[in-house]
Image: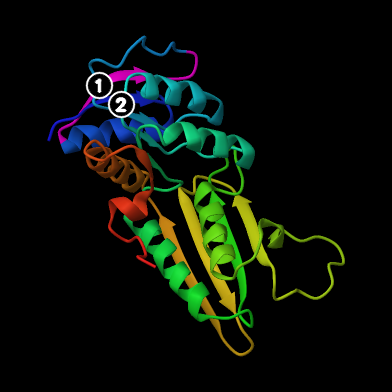
């Protein structure tokens, strides 16, 4: 399969990695767009749109994809929840893979976290810790947000149960909370750890990325997969066949 791709965010770190991964896969970046560049009037020469840019650019790009009935892969993170809900409704009109992380290993981490949260009860305190390079603009990362969502869902907790860092005299930790912690520094591509800490034992699930290429190659896998799918919003669990049938 040879795909013609519109790449938004082409000059960013992830955009450059996607460009290389596309060449490796035998695909072609037919249109490269970055901040300040005008979007094309139509997508006649493109098979799929791939977006690794900024949250502010997502709405216009989705509208372009919907008008042209083109599938889209979105890897941009940092949307506020209310905005993301509006964008998801728009994305559902075309085949769309929207994921906070396109790594095979991270998506296995999602699956293992779901299993652990299902098996380990609230006697095991759940904490999520992520670290990224100093240039990352949003926190927590999209991957950490997804890990938190998985734990909240399995434990039947609302978003109010999240604790984004702790400061001062917080009192004893409640068993009905999930900690979320973001570290920033250096050139760290992306580290994510989920901790389930019980009395007498602790389980830690960790994924460390050392090369942005794993994300770009996953995005190309998603692009090849989504072009043959009906309209709807999918994620990498769908692409990789890891979706829990329950």
Element marked by disc 1: loop
In this rendering, does residue 135 appear at all? no
- Indicate left or right for 164 with 60 as reference: right
Query: In the image as oriented, which residue stretches furthest toward the right?
Result: 169
Tell me the residue that label 2 is attached to. Answer: 70
Residue 175 x %, y %: 70, 76
Query: What residue is drawn where x is 19% and y is 31%?
Result: 27
Q: Indicate how the structure is coloured in the image.
A: rainbow
| Pointers 1 and 2 in contact (C-beta within 8 Å) | yes
Nearer to us of marks 1 and 2 is 2
User: The magenta stretch spans which residues?
Assistant: 26-36
Element marked by disc 2: loop
User: Which of 94/183 is in front?
Assistant: 94
- Indicate left or right for 181 with 136 as reference: right
Between the C-alphas of marks 1 and 2, the distance is 8 Å
Residue 144 x %, y %: 54, 55
């Amino acid at each position: 399969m040879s795909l013609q791709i519109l790449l938004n965010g082409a000059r960013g770190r992830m955009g450059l990695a996607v460009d290389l991964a596309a060449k490796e896969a035998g695909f072609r970046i037919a249109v490269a767009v970055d901040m300040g560049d005008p979007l094309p009037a139509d997508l006649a020469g493109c098979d799929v749109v791939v977006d690794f840019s900024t949250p502010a650019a997502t709405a216009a790009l989705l509208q372009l994809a919907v008008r042209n009935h083109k599938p889209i892969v979105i890897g941009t993170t940092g949307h506020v929840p209310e905005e993301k809900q509006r964008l998801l409704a728009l994305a559902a009109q075309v085949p769309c893979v929207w994921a906070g992380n396109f790594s095979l290993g991270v998506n296995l981490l999602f699956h293992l976290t779901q299993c652990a949260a299902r098996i380990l009860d609230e006697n095991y305190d759940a904490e999520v810790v992520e670290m990224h390079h100093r240039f990352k603009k949003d926190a927590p990362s999209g991957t950490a947000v997804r890990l938190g969502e998985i734990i909240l869902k399995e434990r039947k907790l609302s978003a109010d149960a999240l604790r984004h860092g702790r400061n001062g005299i917080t009192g004893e930790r409640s068993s009905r909370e999930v900690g979320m912690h973001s570290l920033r520094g250096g050139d760290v591509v992306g580290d994510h750890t989920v901790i389930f800490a019980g009395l007498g034992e602790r389980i830690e699930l960790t994924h460390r990325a050392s090369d942005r290429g794993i994300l770009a190659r996953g995005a190309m896998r998603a692009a090849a997969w989504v072009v043959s799918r009906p309209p709807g919003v999918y994620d990498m669990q769908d692409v990789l066949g890891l979706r829990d049938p329950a």
